[in-house]
Image (cartoon, rainbow, N blue to C red):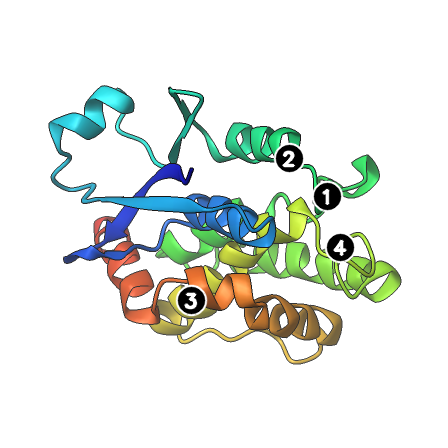
Amino acid sequence: MAIEVVVKAATGAPDVLGDCPFCHRVLLTLEEKKVAYKLLLVNLSDKPSWFLEVSPEGKVPVVKFDGKWVPDSDVIVGILEDKYPDPSLVTPPQFSSVGSKINGAFVKFLLSKDPSDGSEQALLEELKALDEHLKAHGPYVAGEKVTAVDLSLAPKLYHIDIALGHFKKWVFPENLRSLSAYKKLLFARESFVKTKAVPEHVIAGWETKVNAA
């Protein structure tokens, strides 16, 4: 029996998978664990009433487990690990927070209108720290095999590539070689190729936020 998963539809294309990195993380987890699932796409700018019944706060992703709808990608991924322990995607505790500040730094820099506010530098420092970690422990965050922390980072790194490239003409520093190799590894995984939003939908997803900033 396939698990029902409610995720964001693409901005301007309600029948196509959207660009939410938290939804993407859940789909990557399902794919890596080879769990059958059924996608339910939601247009977040025109939320249907059935969706607000299962997610009163109007947030995605939401997944149905044993007849009960569960929000929050952290919680969902934890339940998937318990219910489908093989293959294990558990990240060793000492590595579980690696890269955890990257997304916040990325969003701040993306929405910043002031080139001297330090937001670009803050993002670069986080990316350098991840690069150093991978140099010592790679190719993945916890070593030879992919774990939950990688599946959380992959969509965010993808958004950084596309959104900063489009809105800021910014590219990843070439000297972060371990990080570049890591991105290539993640983006080439079958699970990622199957579940990623196309670049124009990532751009469309950020457009209103960037324009409103």
The residue mark sitting in front, 3 or 4, is 4
Chain-order first, disc 3 or disc 2: 2
Residue to which mark 1 is pinned: 88
Contact? badges 1 and 2 (CB < 8 Å): yes
Determine whether, in the image, residue 59 is placed left or right of residue 94.
left
Per the model, the C-alpha gap separating discs 2 and 4 is: 18 Å
> Looking at this view, is 140 or 157 the one in front?
140
Q: Residue 119 location, x and y as percent?
A: 51, 54
The residue mark sitting in front, 2 or 4, is 2
Query: In the rendered structure, which amino acid carries the disc numbered 1?
Result: Ser
Q: Is residue 39 above or below residue 11?
A: above
> Looking at this view, is 39 or 180 the one in front?
39
Residue to which mark 4 is pinned: 141
Chain-order first, disc 1 or disc 2: 2
Q: Secondary structure at mark 1?
A: loop
Residue to which mark 2 is pinned: 81
Q: Is residue 188 above or below residue 138?
A: below
Chain-order first, disc 4 or disc 1: 1
Query: In the rendered structure, which amino acid carries the disc numbered 2?
Result: Glu
